[in-house]
Amino acid sequence: MGCSAAEDFMTLLEAEILRHPVFNEGFTRRLATLSHFPIEAAQRFALAYYPHILRTRRYQANALGLAEDEQIQFALAQILADEYGNGNEARTHMAMYRRFMRGVGVAEELIAAGGTLFPELRLYIDAMMAFTRTGDWLAAAAAVGIAMEWPIPHMYTEFLKGLRKIPGITDEALELFTEHVVLDIGHSRLMRDVLLPYAETPENQVRIRAGVFYNLEARWVMMQGLERVVFGTPSRP
């Protein structure tokens, strides 16, 4: 039996996402190819990425509130439950990231202050908050359920190549990243299944793709700022 139009669309979309510069150039590539990750740079990364980690669930919650389909609502609710540790405060993704921050020696007062909010990240936050509060509900679901889930196993696998070069880093400190390599495979399948019925028509394919690339283009700007903050200078092609 051949693939449906929706399945073909999803397969092609996934391939297009994974070719995006966010996951293959700039900060991601630079981190993945490090021979050594100095502790000072690791601390800058930990602090600069923290505001992004803190806000991810707000975009997902906004998209859940917009969604007109109960199955999509359920999928986003399940992702949110996992993000919040399914009721275990020590297992929330925010708590796991704070263990990473402590693992690279970030001071408690800096953790309490919420990290380093650089301009490109502020633009990303504002863009995603607006899009998931007032945008097209299907595009919003795609922005958080595809663009923020599907590529993460690949991206965090690349991140880990560099993060493991931090002097003295432990497996426990890196758990936020290692867990997402596995967890987001499940989240990706969940979102693919609930969005698949909507991907049968060209009109909805346009809406889904618009949401995905709204996120990815905003994230690309954010990642260029992250590279500047962590490494001081942009990488060269």
Image (spheres, rainbow, N blue to C red):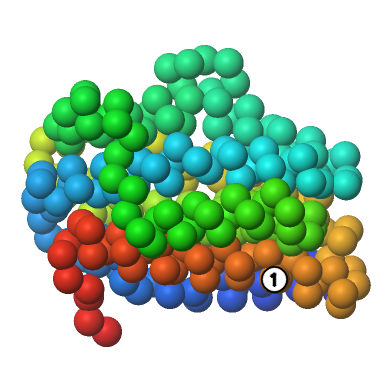
The x, y position of residue 136, in whole percent, is 78, 60
Q: Nearer the viewer, residue 9 or 206?
A: 206
Q: Quadrant of residue 21?
A: bottom left
Taking the image as shown, residue 8 lies to the left or right of residue 216, namely right
- Quadrant of residue 14 in the image? bottom right
Q: Is residue 73 above or below residue 10?
A: above
Q: Amino acid at mark 1?
A: Ala
* Residue drawn 75% across the image and 66% down it: 208
Quarter of the figure with the N terminus: bottom right
* Residue 204 shown left or right of residue 59 in the figure: right
Please state which of residues 54 and 165 is positioned toward the viewer in this rendering: 54
- The residue sitting at 67% across, 38% down in the picture is 61
Report crowding for label 1: few under 14, some 14 to 19, many 20 or more residues within 10 A (C-alpha). some
Return the x and y of residue 131 as percentages of the image width and height. Answer: 66, 57
In the rendered view, tell whether residue 187 sits above or below residue 233: above
Residue under the point 48% across and 25% down? 92
